[in-house]
Image: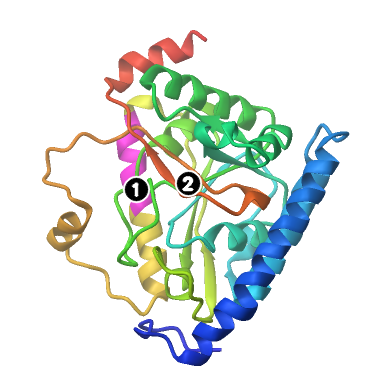
Amino acid sequence: MNALGPRPDPLPLSERLMSYCVRAPVFFLATAFFGSLALAVSLFEKNGCWQHRIAKAWARAGVMASGAKVTILHGERLKARPAVYVANHLSYMDTPVIFSSLPFQFRIVARSGLFKLPFIGWWLRRSGQVSVDVGNPRASIASLVSAVRTLKSGMPLFIFPEGGRTETGHLAKFLNGPAFMAIRAQVPLVPMALIGTHELLPIHSSQVHPVPVTLVVGEPMETQGKTTRQVDEVTARLEEEIATLYYEHSWRKKPARDELQEQNGIDGHTETPAAGASGTAGVAGAGDLEAVSISRDLEELTEEARRS
């Protein structure tokens, strides 16, 4: 295994051959096998417990196929309680790492378009994942309220907040969907940082570069007593917490504020989108995070949601 650091470009020939001839075929075979098994189990299981176990088995097989070794720091903070677990998004391998690392059953927030796809959509619906409508602002709020109901039922949620995989390896601007859900349900936000998956398999690449991967779990952020008027404030704090965890353990240096804003396309006057949703779900192992961009006066829309 390689040391964590800048990814070679191009990769050594041995790694390229290993990716195409061994790692990718094993990953796709594992996805087909565990996906079929999960779909079969979903025909008679209602609570998603066994489907989640199958998803964890798929994730462990995927991580093993990649050649990465995953280390969890502060794993004692991962508790099976209603909370919104949030991590930065660097790679297609983020989802396998999350499913293999979190030691309890949870649901992910996925864009509604995936629910319409054959096979993947069937599994998403039958396993109880949470859909967010990316095309309609008011439907997006209704979808977030559905996520809140999941939290209030006692099930933890996981979401990527950035709206997509970063191309640079640095954190992108966070959307405020996770904070909205946590505040509405009055449950903690748990910040987590993924380090190494960008070097392992960055966006637009199909070649794996095996490196150590670390999942750092931060201190839970309580939302008791906060209101939806504080969504942007809580989102800013969440982003800062994850950035701190990330740059403390990454070989990368934290960009200066102006440089980071330039990378994220922020001019200081851009309206903040209201939600992020995972486009990669469980054993489906495909798709990408997409922003749920809604034009909104958040107070007006959330007032309608409160009455639902």
Tag 1 secondary structure? helix
Residue found 67% across the figure and 74% down from its top: 64
> If you read the primary sequence from the N terminus, does the residue marked by circle 2 or circle 1 appear first?
2
Rendered-image quadrant of the N terminus = bottom right
The region drawn magenta spans 230-239
Report the front residue among 24 and 296. 24
Residue type at mark 2 is: Met
Does the rendering let one see residue 169? yes
Name the residue beneath numbered marker 1.
237
Most foreground residue, 167 or 249? 167
Note whether residue 69 is visible: no
Q: CA distance from mark 2 to mark 1?
A: 9 Å
Work out whether 181 lies above or below 23.
above
| Residue at 39%, 50% in the rendered image | 164
| Residue at the outermost top position | 307
**Residue tagged by mark 2?**
221
Residue 238 is inside the magenta segment = yes
The spot of residue 162 in percent (x, y) is 37, 48
Q: Is residue 47 left or right of residue 186?
A: right
> What residue is shown at x 65% (from left), y 56% (from top)?
99
